[in-house]
Image: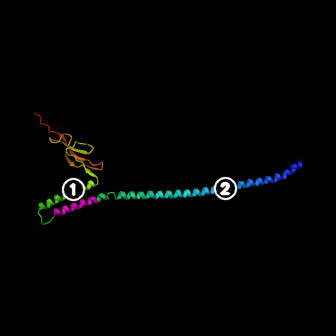
Amino acid sequence: MSTEFANDSPAAETAAPEEAIQAEDAAVAEAVEEKQQLIAAQEEAVQYKDKFLRLAAEFDNYKKRMERERLISLKYAGEYIMKEMLSVVDNLERAIAAGQAEGTSAEINLNALSEGLRLTHKNMIASLEKLEVKGIDSIGKPFDPNVHEAMTMEESDQVAASHILKEYEKGYFFKDRLLRPAKVIVSAGKKSAPADA
């Protein structure tokens, strides 16, 4: 029996080193695979970092470009308004020239100047309306402290109390926002009869 045991022993001894070698080979293969996965993950991380840095730089450039465009827009925001005002300047120059025409009487020059100013005023109102600036019609309307600024009150038989009697300066809206309130004289109502003493 001991011989049997002795015969099995060398086979077991050769089997054990083979298993150890196989286990060692498996461990080495697993370590190599893990190392390859680690290298692949590191390469992927480098790619993601590169993409992130490129995106960050692109976004930074976008922000700078948008800021430049915003500043340019602000700088030239009034260009359209200025173009509209140039026609008013042209009309004023023509009115002045017509009012100073040589060889004509002072009355004709004055009439030409007056007509030129009327046309210029009409042109200016048209330009303002293009820009969505609209005048406030105040005379005869009830006083509204949101759009009117009362300068004084006067008695009037023609205009009801707390209604606009006269206008010092016309008020204007720009779109839906008050640009300037109308400066007005408000009616205090009918004149009171003098009291008998």
Read off the residue under disc 1: 122
Tell me if residue 162 comes above or below residue 55 in the rendering. Answer: above
Q: Quadrant of the C terminus?
A: top left
- The residue shown at (20%, 48%) is 168
Q: Which mark is residue 94?
A: none
* Residue span colored magenta: 83-100
- The residue shown at (17%, 58%) is 115
| Magenta: main secondary structure | helix
Read off the residue under disc 2: 33
Task: Residue 85: say if magenta.
Answer: yes
Q: Residue furthest left?
A: 196
Q: Which residue occupies the foreground of this view, 133 or 191?
A: 133
Q: Could you tell me which secondary element the residue under label 1 belongs to?
A: helix
Question: On the image, which quarter does residue 67 sit in?
Answer: bottom left
Q: Position of residue 129 (x, y in %)?
A: 26, 53
Q: Residue furthest top?
A: 197
